[in-house]
Amino acid sequence: MNYSPLIGLALSLSVVLNPTSALARPAGGTGLKAEILDVKLSEKRNPVVTFRIGDDQGAPLDRTELGELRFTIAAAKADGAGATTYQSYILSKVPGREYVHKGERRKPALADTLQPDYDRDGTFARLKPGLFTYTFKTALPENYDRKETLAVGGELTRESRKYVVNPLYAFVPASGKVALPQPAIATATCNNCHDPLKPHGELRRETGYCALCHTSQLTDPETAENLDLKVLVHKIHRGKNLPSVKDGKPYVVVGNRQNVFDFSTIGLPQDIRNCQSCHTGRQAVIWMNRPGMAACLSCHDNVDAKTGKNHPGGPLVEGTCAGCHQPKGEEFGPSVAGAHVDPLKAAQLGGIVFDILKIEGGKPGTSPTVTFSVKDKKGQPVDISKMENLRLVVAWPTTEYRVARDEDVRKTPPQGNGVFTYQFKYAIPADAKGSGAIAIQGYKEYNLKRGNGKIIKGVRDVGINLVNYFPITDSAPAPRRTVVKTANCNSCHETLMAHGENRRVTEYCVFCHNANQTDEVKRKQAKGPMPPVNVDFKILIHKLHTGEEIGEPYVIYGGSPASPGPIDFGEVRFPGDRRNCAKCHEKGTYELPLLPQVLATPVPQADGSRVAVPPITAVCSACHTKDPAKAHIETQTAAGGRETCVVCHAKDREFSVTKAHRR
């Protein structure tokens, strides 16, 4: 068994000072705050940590109110690339054990290994309320360097891990406290997606703390995988796109109790070359300025450092990478930044910039006329006849879209300076009411040049979608309500890109992903099984982000007309906590009751009929797919689809959506 604090639930061999405290009512207020105030070394070189614990209001807590209370210590070192890494002073011998992966029993790669750990069986002393010391049982070696920076980190929990903190402290034994070395990736950056970061049974919340154990000393004995933080994180996030995975070798790590973690199905929701998405703040340029073998070969794991296979520069020697791989240089060249350019963001692209200047007409029974412009990023007109895609889309009503129609406008004659006027062939029905919306989409394809003369073919230069509104019978245009802003999506996706990178804003997505929309057209093109699946946005997005937790395949037919095919979103591994509705939604848009104009969703049946699923049911059942939840929904829905959910789940009720999703 692997007893390391690496992957999975942490071992329950912590210093639990009162085993029954989790069952008792805490004496202090709610929450947990902890701060390491000082670290000294005893005469025998045992670290002595002085720390303070309190509740959210700062009131002191007693150690009996805590669950886990652990500390570790490591020395800050410079790696071969000049970046800061750590070497742990606490190592435990971990034997390799047999494990089972996909039904196959496998032998461990290593008989045993030493792994960084936390100190065990140290002693505590109470100085005064809320103030304590912890003396490590582990002593530093006699030859330790008194001038090196040492970092101490802790993990403290309260109320069965409801509250977890990881205080950190850095000092130099010869001179005292110093600034803590900044981690390559800030915790807040991880939490853009992970909401929050909490591996190992939710005990590890700070990247600075993760780095104290995930050092170059750390190896998984079962698979022999290197679990140094920079290696582990890169490999996890490249996941199914790792060269080794594509060649048929899964990326697997075995954790506590022989739990197997297969990261081979992870798909990052943005381009892996967007290094700046994770490397932010004070360490924003470390990925450019300090290239090193461990970090680079974690993503490029088909490179053989000794032979130089798949590396144009030949065999690799640590510390020499920066000689060829300068921080910046030409796109797609050998510089670090150049090699990591996302082709969709290449400077070689001319840029497509849309503007909707005016909408006329669009009254009941008439066709709207749109004046729009298409220019490049320098403000020069674009020849739209040479674009591979340019469409205007009209949808109505904005209270809740029912209809969306798109038309190709590439043959529209220019009026000068990149301006065009187009009248829709589609006419707004005579009985239509309210307001409508017009959107624009399109792209031009480029062949991009690499420094070595090779060509990247067919890269799409995509314009950001614009949406404008017009009145049908309203006195003034009424925009559609905003439920989810694109910026919320981009906190994880970096740049939302769907349907061949052509759909970039949620305000436009809801045009077509309305309550009446299905994937029927794509299924017929691909000769896929019927009935079609409804792709109403409020169902699609919830199901897509529920992913593998749906418990069943969720297959939508999509893709280009030339190659439509099935996409199984039941394989999505969402990194956040779906109970945090505010992560995606605008304030108040997830509370009940829903607005009266929100439509029921007609769900296609095998016999060709459609069953209208009431709107609240459509949303909630997208995530709550288990039989008890379905039965509850059915029993609380009256004849004719009248939902009674608001009786218990409305805002300010006992089981409001906010309360029911409280984390």
Image (cartoon, rainbow, N blue to C red):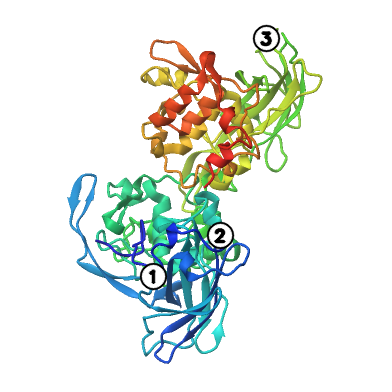
Q: Which residue is mark 1?
A: 15
| Relative vertical location of residue 74 with respect to residue 56 in this rendering, above or below | below
Tell me the kind of residue under disc 3: Pro
Please identify, in this view, whether the residue under mark 3 or under mark 1 is nearer the observer.
Answer: 1
Give the side of residue 475 with respect to residue 331, left or right: right
The first of marks 2 and 3 along the sequence is 2
Residue that extends furthest to the right in the rendered view of this protein? 475
Q: Residue at x 63, y 40 (%)?
A: 351
Gap between marks 2 and 3 measured at Cα: 58 Å
What residue is disc 3 on? 429
Of 249 and 114, nearer the camera is: 114
Q: Secondary structure at mark 2?
A: loop
Whole-percent x, y for residue 48 in the image? 46, 82
Q: Earlier in the sequence, mark 2 or mark 1?
A: 1
| Nearer the observer, 192 or 338 | 192
- Name the outermost residue toward the bottom: 43
Above or below — where is 534 with respect to 491? above
Looking at the image, which residue is at 62% across and 43% down? 487
Q: Residues within 10 Å of mark 3 (few under 14, many from 20)?
A: some
Mark found first going from the N terminus, 3 or 1: 1
Assess disc 1: are there few (<14), some (14-19) or many (≥20) residues with their C-alpha within 10 Å of its C-alpha.
some
Would you say residue 354 is visible in this rendering?
yes
